[in-house]
Image (cartoon, rainbow, N blue to C red):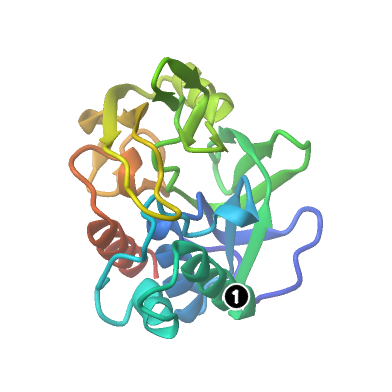
């Protein structure tokens, strides 16, 4: 599958083996495991401050054994907030050979034609190239967050939705279903207020396992796919997808 094998410092036009869009739990797990397997991986997120972000006031667990998330969870104090887990995961990814952790907003996916790579266009302007793409965008495809009577374009509190990417995929014929997650809130310091998020997931007909049927070497994992997803199942799915791609 992969035309590019040697690793190098990313430069304009750099061609990655795999580009992972979204640095939630599933995306981080895919990127970390692929890098361990020797792949040259781009992990792109709208904000480096939201890598492995959670909505709980405390770190849940355990996660699947030998996963990046479980290794990070064990490295922080049990009474720490998720911010400590975020710092630990982000630090491990930044130190991991083979992972380029990039803050950027992917606005469009141009599928590969022939031997050319897939191209990810960004809101900021530069395009990114990869032989395979993983969509791990969670609840951010046209996410609408409602707290009380207020609604905003967000996939999680204070985190902006992926409207551009959702609209681009829809224009290319990708079909979706709508889902809503309701969060009852959490009392105590750091606990979030109750809110609900309505967002798009890929329709079951779009997928064959992790693979998008319409485009070779484009995959999806985590909350943007059909079915119930927990923190642990997202990490486990990321691990399995990495096994497929490695």
Q: Quadrant of residue 182?
A: top left
Query: Residue 227, image x and y in percent?
Result: 18, 40
User: Quick check: 174 left or right of 124?
Assistant: left
Task: Tell me what residue is drawn at x 62 percent, y 41 percent.
Answer: 120
User: Quick check: 192 left or right of 6?
Assistant: left
For residue 19, above or below residue 183: below
- Badge 1 crowding class, 10 Å Cα cut-off, few under 14, some 14 to 19, many 20 or more, is few
Toward the left, the furthest residue is 227
Q: Quadrant of residue 63?
A: bottom left
Task: Tell me what residue is drawn at x 80 percent, y 61 percent.
Answer: 11
Quadrant occupied by the C terminus:
bottom left
Task: Tell me what residue is drawn at x 51 percent, y 75 percent.
Answer: 35
Judging depth in this view, the residue of 154 and 147 nearest the camera is 147
Task: Tell me what residue is drawn at x 31 percent, y 82 percent.
Answer: 66
Q: Provide the secondary structure element on which disc 1 rests.
A: helix
Judging depth in this view, the residue of 94 and 117 nearest the camera is 94
Judging depth in this view, the residue of 156 and 127 nearest the camera is 156
Query: Residue 31, image x and y in percent?
Result: 48, 65
**How many numbered marks are there?**
1
Q: Which residue is mark 1?
A: 91
Query: Residue 209, image x and y in percent?
Result: 22, 48
């Amino acid at each position: 599958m992969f035309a590019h094998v040697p690793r190098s410092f990313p430069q304009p036009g750099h061609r990655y083996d795999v580009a992972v869009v979204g640095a939630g739990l599933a995306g981080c797990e895919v990127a970390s495991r692929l890098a361990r397997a020797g792949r040259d991986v781009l992990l792109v997120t709208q904000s480096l401050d939201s890598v492995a972000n959670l909505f709980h006031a405390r770190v849940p667990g355990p996660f699947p054994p030998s996963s990046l998330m479980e290794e990070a969870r064990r490295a922080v104090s049990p009474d720490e907030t998720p911010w400590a887990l975020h710092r630990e995961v982000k630090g491990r990814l930044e130190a991991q050979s083979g992972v380029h952790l990039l803050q950027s907003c992917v606005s469009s996916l141009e599928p590969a034609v022939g031997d050319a790579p897939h191209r990810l266009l960004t809101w900021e302007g530069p395009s990114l190239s990869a032989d395979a793409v993983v969509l791990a965008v969670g609840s951010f495809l046209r996410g609408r967050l409602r707290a009380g009577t207020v609604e905003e374009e967000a996939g999680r509190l204070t985190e902006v939705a992926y409207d551009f990417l959702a609209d681009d995929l829809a224009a290319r014929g990708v079909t979706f279903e709508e889902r809503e997650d309701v969060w009852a809130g959490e009392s105590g310091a750091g606990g979030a207020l109750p809110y609900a998020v309505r967002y798009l997931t890929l329709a079951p007909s779009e997928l064959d396992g992790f693979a998008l049927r319409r485009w070779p070497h484009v995959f999806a994992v985590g909350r943007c796919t059909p079915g119930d997803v927990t923190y642990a199942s997202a990490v486990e799915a990321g691990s399995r997808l990495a096994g497929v791609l490695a």
